[in-house]
Image (cartoon, rainbow, N blue to C red):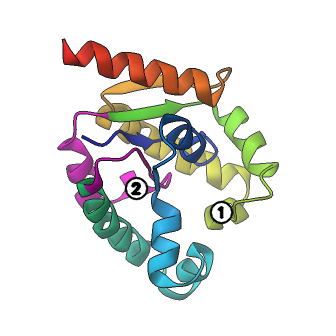
Amino acid sequence: MSVILIGFMGAGKSTVAKALSADYIDLDRVIERQIQRSIASYFEEFGEAEFRVLEGEVLAEQLKKNLPIATGGGIVERIENRKLLKQHTQVVYLKADFSVLFDRILNDATHVRPLAKNGEAVLKARYLAREKYYETLANLVINVNQKTPEEIARHIREWQKEGEI
C-alpha cells in the first residue's frame, strides 16, 4: 500500500517521498504533466475548486501504483479527496509550525505556489483551516521542524515495520 504524505506547503512532502524511494510520485508534477501546464496557470484559468477535482482524480489513479505519494498541501480541501485519503492506512502528516513553513515558502526558489501570493495572514488562515484535516486523516503524525528528510523517512519505515507485526 502507498504511503501518502500530507501536510502544508513547505513541509517537505516531495523531499521525504524521494528519501523513501527513488520511485515516488509527486502528485503536483504528475498533474502538470497531464495538463501540460503549470498548476499556477491552471489555477488562474480554472480556479482552485476545479483544480481540487482534478487533484483527487489523479490521486485515485496514482494510488494503484503502490509507491510513496507526495500530495499537494490542499488535497484535504475537498471532501471527496478526504474520503479517498481516509480509506488508506498509511497516511502520514508532516507537521511543522507555521513560522517554519512560511520561512521555507519564502526561500523556495523552485516551487511556484499560487496561494502564497496572497500574503502571510491569508496563508496562515489557510494553514489553520487545513490543520484539523491533516490531523484527523493521518495514521501517523511527524513533527518535521528539526528533522532531516532521511530521519523522517527512517521514522516512517520503522512505523511501517511495526504495523507488520
Question: Is 164 rendered above or below residue 109?
Answer: above
Q: Nearer the viewer, residue 35 or 138?
A: 35
Label 1 secondary element = loop
**Residue at 61% in and 75% down:** 40
Tell me, yes or no, whether the highlighted magenta stretch contains residue 88.
yes
Q: Which of 2 and 119 is in front in this view?
A: 2
Write down the region rendered in magenta: 65-90
Q: Name the residue under label 1.
A: 113
**Residue at 50% in and 21% down:** 154
Question: Is 165 rendered above or below residue 13?
Answer: above
Image x and y of residue 69, in percent: 41, 48
**Residue count near mark 1 (Cα–Cα under 10 Å), binned few <14, some 14–19, many ≥20:** few
Q: Can residue 79 be seen in this view?
A: no
In the picture as drawn, the residue positioned furthest to the bottom comes out as: 45
In the picture as drawn, the residue positioned furthest to the front comes out as: 22
Image x and y of residue 27, in percent: 45, 60
Question: Is 115 rendered above or below residue 68?
Answer: below
Residue 90 occupies quadrant = top left
Q: Is residue 22 visible?
A: yes
Amino acid on which the number 2 mark rests in the picture: Ile
Left or right: residue 125 compared with residue 54: right
Label 2 secondary element = helix
Instruction: Give the mark nearest the N terminus, 1 or 2.
Output: 2
Image x and y of residue 61, in percent: 27, 65
Left or right: residue 54 compared with residue 88: right
Residue 75, label in figure: 2
**Residue at 35% in and 39% down:** 3
Left or right: residue 85 compared with residue 48: left
Residue 98, label in figure: none
Amino acid on which the number 1 mark rests in the picture: Arg
**Inter-mark Cα distance, 1 to 2:** 14 Å
